[in-house]
Amino acid sequence: MGKSSHKRRAQAKRQIVDPDTLDTDSQVHTPETIGRMIAGASYAAVGHGADTPLFNQFIRRLTQIELSVASEMRPTALLALDIQRRISALYEQGWQPADIAHAIKRQFTVRAWRLVIAFIAADARATDAVNRAPAAWLSQLEELQVVNVARDAIIGGRDQPLAVWARVEKLDPDEIISVAIQVNAQLLRLPVVSVLVTPPSAWGASNKGLPPTTPRSSSSAPSSASSASASAADIDTKALKLIRALLAKAEATTFPAEADSFTAKAQQMMTRYSIDAAVLASGAAGDKRASGIEQRRVHIDNPYADEKADFIAVLAHVNGARCVWSPSLGFATIIGFPVDLHLTDLLFTSLLLQATRASAEATANDRDLRTASFRRAFLIAFADRIGERLEATKKSAAAEAEAEYGSALLPILASRQVAVADAFAEAFPNVTFTQSRSLNAHGWHAGRAAGDRATIGTGEAITSG
């Protein structure tokens, strides 16, 4: 970093962190002065301005104020307002509940994650999410155990979420303020992202009476489109439920032959499901080849997040989708038709579990191989070989489908590929590609071998290429 950059950063720090706010116990504190302390502590908490001694100094001062002023003036009360407002603002800037929870969990502790969950629940209560949120939003709230849609219930009570969380965690005031400021600081650093799900400001009055997985169809759409939409939803409900069940059984069994049987059936259903959905959609959409293309975020945890992102990119490509990795945010965005996004996500979850197990087995009897470089190379090679096998399976299944659908199938699939490529280029015009990395040779060969052994549902072995 050059001298001018250091100078600009120092100047910015002086503007945000006012040393006078820490000087004396005798000064009269107002929401403005306390707010400046919170801003200073947030700046010192994380990121480029991180300064542990200064952060601790702010925490001590804010704790003293917490114990000496009226309740409405306490730093915790002002922090709670800041966090709640920031979450509401992030929703309007493209962030979803699961995105925010992931951003906090990957940066801080599970305790901090529970705090942000409490604020997500408070926002869900304030916006009447159970009755108004889109199905995708509600699904995230259920996965985070914020809401129980069946009971119309939201966790927590009417009390301020920071106070409720602090009581449950049994924390001292300095610990409460420290964790809350860290969460607040991370939320402040999150950038604007693409809006993939309708945010609270645009929700309708109520979603009651709408099936949770059925898309809302336009009243002006022709009856054929409406019928196709209903049929597609029916396929989604029945086929995906069975695919998930088969993959779950394959992951749970300790018998390889049984796992092969379950995954073979799941893969057969996946491939056929995707092709059938493509044919169905082509009849409904007419010339609107890009109709229905969506984006989905897949949260990727450390360690080896870059390699896991490479893995999902391979699976997305095989399934006719595209993928871009945002390392600073910890998520990959996949873009494509809904059915292909579903399949990519399902395969990634299942095969990543297999890769993790295979890596552990490969290093179980050799401590010298238990290195980060080995595991990185293993995961990349595993994904590379899985991609080759899935491509072979895809070609075989497509050939079978072409025999049934005839010459009309190839133009439909080609049109979808072009539509996805165009949508990806429009959504991510400034994508950059990472350079290839030198890899641990032992890890690479072990990963390729494990990729050969992994059950992907082909029902038969594919010889090494």
Image (spheres, helix red, strand yellow):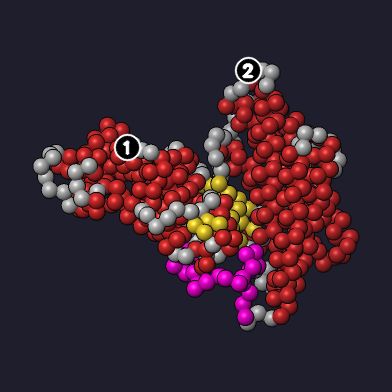
- Residue at the spot 87% in from the left edge and 56% down from the top edge: 400
Q: Nearer the viewer, residue 316 or 6?
A: 316
Name the spot of residue 210 as percent of width and height, x first.
Answer: 61, 70
Query: Can residue 58 be seen at all in this image of the molecule?
Result: no
Q: Does the magenta portion include 211?
A: yes
Q: Residue furthest left?
A: 26
- Residue at the spot 12% in from the left edge and 39% down from the top edge: 24
Q: Does the magenta portion include 221?
A: no
Q: Nearer the viewer, residue 355 or 251?
A: 251
Name the spot of residue 254 as percent of width and height, x first.
Answer: 77, 34
- Residue at the spot 64% in from the left edge and 68% down from the top edge: 211
Name the spot of residue 294 as percent of width and height, x first.
Answer: 61, 61
Estimate the spatial distance between the alpha carbons at disc 2 and disc 1, rounded to whole Å: 43 Å
Write down the quadrant of residue 424 in the picture.
Answer: bottom right
Task: Find the magenta span and give its range.
Answer: 196-219
Query: Can residue 231 be seen at all in this image of the molecule?
Result: yes
Q: Which mark is residue 172?
A: 1
Name the spot of residue 118 as percent of width and height, x first.
Answer: 43, 50
Say whether residue 151 is left or right of residue 247: left
Q: Which mark is residue 367?
A: 2
Q: Say which amino acid is labelled 2.
A: Arg
Say whether residue 339 is left or right of residue 207: right
Residue 358, placed above or below residue 94: above
Observer-side mark, 2 or 1, equals 1
Residue 227, placed above or below residue 351: below
Say whether residue 210 is left or right of residue 263: left
Q: What secondary structure is marked by label 1?
A: loop
